[in-house]
Each structure stands twice: as structure tokens, then as C-alpha cells.
Image (cartoon, coloured by chain):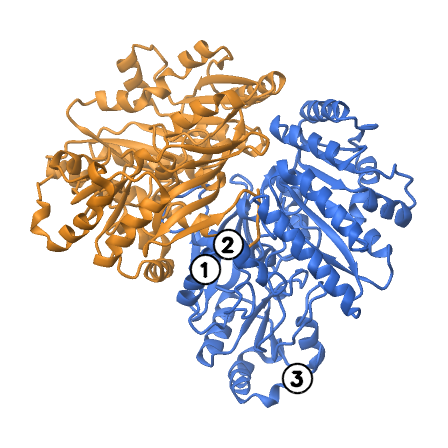
Chain colours: A orange, B blue
Amino acid sequence: MQRQDTDTNAVMSHVIDALSPHFGDRLVTSWAMREQHGHDESWHAGAAPDAVVFPHSTDEVSLIVSECARHKVAVIPFGAGTSLEGHVAAVRGGVTIDMSQMADVVRVSAEDLDCTVQAGITRKTLNAHLRDTGLFMPVDPGADATVGGMVSTRASGTNAVRYGTVRENVLGLTVVLADGSVVRTGGRARKSASGYDLTHLLTGAEGTLGVITEITLRLHGIPEETGAATCSFASVDDAVATVIQTIQSGIPVARIELLDDVMVRACNAYSQLGLPEQPMLFLEFHGSAAGVREQAQRVADLAQANGGGDFEWATRAEDRTRLWEARHSAYYAALALSPGRKGFTTDVCVPVSQLAGVISQTRADVEEAHLIAPLVGHVGDGNFHLILLVDPDDGAEVDTAQALHARLVMRALAAGGTCTGEHGIGIGKKHFLALEHGDAVDMMRAIKKALDPDGIMNPGKMLPDV
Amino acid sequence: MQRQDTDTNAVMSHVIDALSPHFGDRLVTSWAMREQHGHDESWHAGAAPDAVVFPHSTDEVSLIVSECARHKVAVIPFGAGTSLEGHVAAVRGGVTIDMSQMADVVRVSAEDLDCTVQAGITRKTLNAHLRDTGLFMPVDPGADATVGGMVSTRASGTNAVRYGTVRENVLGLTVVLADGSVVRTGGRARKSASGYDLTHLLTGAEGTLGVITEITLRLHGIPEETGAATCSFASVDDAVATVIQTIQSGIPVARIELLDDVMVRACNAYSQLGLPEQPMLFLEFHGSAAGVREQAQRVADLAQANGGGDFEWATRAEDRTRLWEARHSAYYAALALSPGRKGFTTDVCVPVSQLAGVISQTRADVEEAHLIAPLVGHVGDGNFHLILLVDPDDGAEVDTAQALHARLVMRALAAGGTCTGEHGIGIGKKHFLALEHGDAVDMMRAIKKALDPDGIMNPGKMLPDV
């Protein structure tokens, strides 16, 4: 990231001068702080903001946004920085609002299975806080993201197949809009037919319509019993057929994940596991003891009918951890396949019936392109990731990977799918938005223009030309 | 409804002249047809449109809207006319688009558990079509509404507690916007983080942002086994405590409905049932044979711990129908309590923990107001209806009912709830919108203005002054 100095920008100085008396040392302009807030965990080029502010309340966020609005300065919300599509890069400079000091649990209602939290709390902190209530927040994207970041990117993860994504688990929001005004959307009722669904408009808006400061979430009871299972298959087709039949039979699996043979090989090498180097399903079941047993038995029968190997299963925590070890370390195992290269992660999601076809065409494409790209999938949802191992300094390799990604997205769209199941558009997929949505992008643009006429909210993200 | 003649309006004549050559006898201006399309099933005053058109395709809907847009004439989408808040009243005249001849199932994918339908198909027709696939569309608001109407009003009904409302079951839409342009939102992927969630913005927009012409829906497997149960309680509090504990235990009940003692008495009188005249829960369980038994047993234990009476239960279809008879005929039984009066139905939804308190305060309020108002509730969601029996020609009684409704809404909002769980705002609840949403109404208004600058899409609905 190239260093830019704030003092080159007179407008920005006005904003900093206006905010400094209020925020004191919670407004930081050091290069180290700016640099750290200019990039996420992806390979996308970062861009440093001019200042980073750490608010403690919705009112303080409103103060920051109002001041930025007055001077048409960009506002970039920042959670844990774990996004994967360059969402936090300050491509037009401006003020990054770091939400990490707004991390309180505002209230929990165990009776209603809901809670309200400040946006900067991470999912692990929230779940630790909830443990004694017997409840948990199920959305698990892997990284210890903030709840605000997860809502803003419409995150999901491994157990969306049972509990839904963030979309199905957010009930209401407090949001600071582009003019600094504060609105509350949704509420605590489980359902409502009252007015436009602003909650879901703002969920997945990637900070381009407002800064989310508080979130009301559904919670779920920690299951009485948890079971885990693994099963190998001769082909991805057989594994996916088992997934389709499982979903279609209404078996309420909590997680159902696929690693392809390349990924299993990577995990064997990384963790010395000795798994059969074949496509493999990783399952988790939640319910009563009897219910979990019944679910596992039914999936085992389906797996066997599809030529699956041993159906290993366990309910004790340490045995479950052992069974799932390969899945948990998959990302790092993938990176270890080619030290020095970075992981460029794709994220298409297709109807489950199309999954085997799209995966097999994609595998052939990867081989033809001579790339290393293990595959891991939230296959119950039709969502899978290739971890393309790419040297960011090798222009030809980057181009090859980008071209392969574009072909993958076209294949997914042709199959009725989406370019991103859970990572969002950010900087990295802007060029796919119109391919996927056609004229609906004009409708998105009209909404953006109406709610953020000066284009100050996380500019350069999602919409191609806003 | 007072008769208005179309020929008094020159602009309208232009529109009719422009559309007639294309639509022939599918454009109707007879008073009988206009009158029929000017009201729904509620007690709200109707208003006839100037013309009713029956399109066969999205392109034809686009043609109609384009022509109306050119002349700034109002467009009112019409499904089955079963809405309850005056949604179809043509309060500014204009063209009603009757979707009943767009009622095809476009495609079903049993493997993916989804389908695409034209908006005019009713839910019962769709479910009859699906029967051989082993799948069903679970949203059941009681009336045989069209899928388009259900999406537009964010409908739900008795089994939302397990399968979600329309909101959780809509994957994508085809919509004709206010300028006649056609957009497709969402898609067939189970989840997506791509762009603004236009699908959910349009779901529940009551036709004020566009005319929905096609819908992609999630489907669910018809359960292997269905069980039904009933149980009486000494008090609403005891019944609701059982509901809360059921939900909190994660028992996946498919339906959990409450009738209060007044409603049970009405059902006894209407259907000669001899039920104990106490608050009563009606339950339905879906799953495997073993799973259904286990669920029922667990709820029976909870009911007993809360002092419940006999827990009657059945799995044979005819026995289930018998058990649920009172619930199925509740609305008509309520009306029969006071022949000649009409049913004015309230629709608040509150966090479940607040339900017993809100119901008991409301029952006291009903008694004090000397109104007859049996209660039926989708209590698993915290949603309940009073059926206020009102003589629409008795101004004082109407005022009393309206005042009671307003107090009920304030009570629900104070409890963190909403003025409408599933019926929508329409004409009847516009004055509650700002009470519930505060400044977020300005955000709704900005979106409306951006997407329908001339205010032609179902004017006079939802937003107080648009």
C-alpha cells in the first residue's frame, strides 16, 4: 500500500479538526493505523483511509457521518477486517469507522430466543457471552468476524443449511444513514408485514447505504446432542447425489461439507491424517439423542446407496473434533500446498442439482489452466469455494486465475446461480454484478442515489460506477 | 361503492384507447367488473378502478404499466382479492391488473426443492400441481390467495413457525417497475451475497414499487408423517408458557395455534363440539413417524407441567381433521357470534415473552369496551388476531373498535412488536406506520420516490402521504 499523507487534503483537515476535540485519542491518523485499516484478509490491493475513528455509541457514529457528509468525505465501516473482497479499502480516502469499541451485548431475551448487540462484537465473543443461556448464534463464516460485518456482507458459512444465513437471522437494525440520521428498522417481532423491509435492504449492502451500529438477532437453542460424521466417495457426483437426497428427504442436517480429492490430499499432507484421497463429506447433526441417531442412520443409508465408504460417526466432543479436523484446517492445508502463493477464493453458489456438473466442469478447467485449486464446499446450499493458489506478483498467473474465475462465474450464472454465495461483491466482483442482475443494477443504483446522493458511503464497492 | 364513470376522465380514455387494440375483451370497463375489483375481503371502503385488464405475460404487464406511466395513471395489481387492509382499492382510479390469467407453473425442480410460478396462481392450485413431486409450498394464510398477493403482503399463516413466512420462502422475482421496465431479482441459488436484496425489498411492498409477475419459491418435502394434537389450559398464561417452552426447547412444531375461551365457546356453538370452554392450543407435528411421536411426547410433557388438560393426539388424516375442526372454522364461528356484524381483524405480533401480558391486557380492554372479540393466534410467532365484531353502519361502535385497535397497537409496539404480523399496512394501518418505524418512514419514502417518482404504483397504500 502506498503511503498517502492526510495533510495534502484541506477538506480532510477540516473533518479531522472538527472531530478531534470530541474523540481525542480515539481519532488516529498514524500511518500504521491507517495502513492496517486499509485492507482485509484477501489478496486485493488495499487503500488507506485518512483517519480512523473508534466510536462508542450510535450517536458518535452519527456525529462522524454528519461531519463527513458536510464535506462529502468518504465513510468506511470497519469490523474485524476479515472480509474477502476488499470491502474495507478506502479507495477514495476518507474516514474509517472502526466498530471494535462498540462490542456490547445490549440485551438477551432467552425466552424470545433473540438478542441485541452492538455491531462491533465478534461472533465468538457473542457466543461465549450466550453460553450460560443455552442459546447460540449459528452463523459461522469461519473467521471471527464482527456481527456488523457479517450482516453487511450477508455472511453465512457451514451451518446455514440448517439455521439459514445472516439474512434469516437478523430481525432489526440501527443504522446511521448518509446524512447522519439514525433509523431503526425491523424490530423484535418474529415476523412483520409493516412497511418496506429495510432490514433486508441494508443486510448485504456492504456499508454502501449506511453504517450498521446495532443488530437484533434470532438465537437458537444449543442442541441437546451433536453428532458428527464423515464419508468418502468414489466421485464428487456420488457425494453430491447423497447431499441432494439428504436435503430432499428433509433430514435437518446442521452442516454438510464437501472436500474434493485435491483438498483431502492437502489435508493429509498438512495434518498427517491418512484419509482416503477421494471426495469426502463432513456432516454434523443437531437434535435430541434419538433424533441425531436417526438422522445419521438415514444419511448413512443414502451414502451407502451412492457407493460411499465407511460412514464414521461420533457424538463425543473430542471424537467429533478429530473427525472434522481436515475440514477445520482446510484453508491452511490448501495454502501449504504451495508456500509463498496466496489463496484467491471463489464463491459461486448454484442450485444443488447443478452442483456436480458445475464442479466437474470447473475441475477440468482448473487442470487445463495448470493451476492448483483445492475445493471446499457448503454443498447443502450449493455453495463451493476454489482456493486458487496464486502468486500475486506473477502477472500471467494472476491473469490465468482471473480468467478461470470469470469462466466459473459464467458457468454458475448459466446454471441459475450467483457469483457470490457469502463473501459479497466488494471490489473484487463488481464486474460480475451486471452479468448476474442485468437491469436490476439500475434499480440498485437508483436506491443508492436516493439514500446516498453524494456517494460517500463506502464508495467504490459493489456498484460498478458509483 | 359509489359508481364513477370512466368517460369523465379524458386521460383515462387515452390509456384505454391505447390498450384496447392489444387486449380486446381482456380489457373490461363494465361497472360490475370494476366494482368487484375495487374491494377485498375486509370491511374497508372499496374504490373502483376505471378499467380492469387481464394480462397473459410479463411483457403484457409491462405494456400496461408503460402506458399508464406515460399518462401518470394509477396501476393496481390484483390477485385473488383476499387481502384484509384495502390493498386493492383504486383510491385514485386507474387500471387494475388482474393477474388471474397468469397462473402457470413455469417450472418445478424437485431436486432443488424450488419452483417458478406466475404471480396469479393460487396457493392451493400450486400445491395440487406439486402433489406428485412429494413437495409442497408451506405458506398458508388460510384464504386461497395468489402467490403474487402473498409475496406482496408478506403473508404467513399457521405453519410459519416451522417453515417461515413468504419472506423466508421467496428466492427471486420478476417485476415490472413503475416505468414499465422489467427486472429479475434474486435467483435460484439458496443464498447469495450479490448486490442489494431487491427480492426482499419488493416482498411486502404491497405493489407500491412494482407489479410482481413471476416468483421463484423454495419448496419443502411433504412430511412422512403428520401428527395433530390439542390441549386445553386453565389460562392463556399457561397455554403461552407451554408455547414458549416448546419453541425454546427447539422442538420443531409445524403449527402451534391458540384459541381463547371466547373463541372456543364460539366454535362449540357453531360446530356443536363440546370442547372445554378454556384457552386451547392446536398443534401439528411434521417428520418421521418416530420424530413426530417424540415431538408430541415432549410437548405433552410441557403442557402437563403447565397444568394442561388431556393432550389429545392423532396421526390419521380424518382424526387430525376432527381435532383441528374448531381451528379451521374459527373465523366463521366468530362471525356467527353476532350475525349481521362484520369481522374487523387485528394483527399485532410481539416477542413471545410479551404475548401473555399483551393478550391479558387486551382481553380486559375488550371487556371494558363492551365489544365481542374472540381471539385466535399463531402464537409460535407471537402473532394473534382479535376478530372484533362490528356493525359498520354503527358509527359509535366503529369508533370504539378503532380506538381499541389503536390501544392494542400501542401496547404491541411498547412490547417491541409490530402493528401487523402478516396482513400488511394497506389503507387500514397507514396511521400506525410512523408510530412503529419513526424516521425510517422517511427512508421508505425516499425509496418510493426514487423508484416511482410519479406515484402511480398502487397509490394511497402503506405510506401515509404518497
Distance from disc 1 to disc 2, alpha carbons, whole Å, reads 10 Å
**Residue shown at 74%/50% (left/top)?**
B365
Is the residue marked by circle 2 packed among few (<14), some (14-19), or many (20+) residues within 10 Å?
many
Given residues B217 and A193, the one toward you in this image is A193
Res A134 visible: yes
Badge 2 or badge 3: first in the primary sequence: 3
User: Pointer 1: what residue?
Assistant: B444
Chain for mark 2? B
Q: Is residue B208 above or below residue B153?
A: below
Chain for mark 3? B
Q: Is residue B61 left or right of residue B393?
A: left
Which x, y percent locates residue A151? Answer: 39, 40
Q: Residue type at mark 3?
A: Gln
Residue farthest along the front direction in this orientation: A21
User: Pointer 2: what residue?
Assistant: B437
At mark 3, the secondary structure is: loop
User: Pointer 3: what residue?
Assistant: B4
Distance from disc 3 to disc 1, alpha carbons, whole Å, reads 32 Å
Disc 3 to disc 1: CB gap under 8 Å: no
Given residues B88 and A178, the one toward you in this image is A178
Given residues A209 and A397, the one toward you in this image is A209
Q: Is residue B40 above or below residue B202?
A: below
Which x, y percent locates residue B185? Answer: 43, 54
Q: Residue type at mark 2?
A: His
Badge 1 or badge 2: first in the primary sequence: 2
Distance from disc 2 to disc 3, alpha carbons, whole Å, reads 36 Å
Q: Is residue A141 above or below residue A24?
A: above
Res B392 visible: no
Q: Is residue A73 left or right of residue B458?
A: left
At mark 2, the secondary structure is: helix
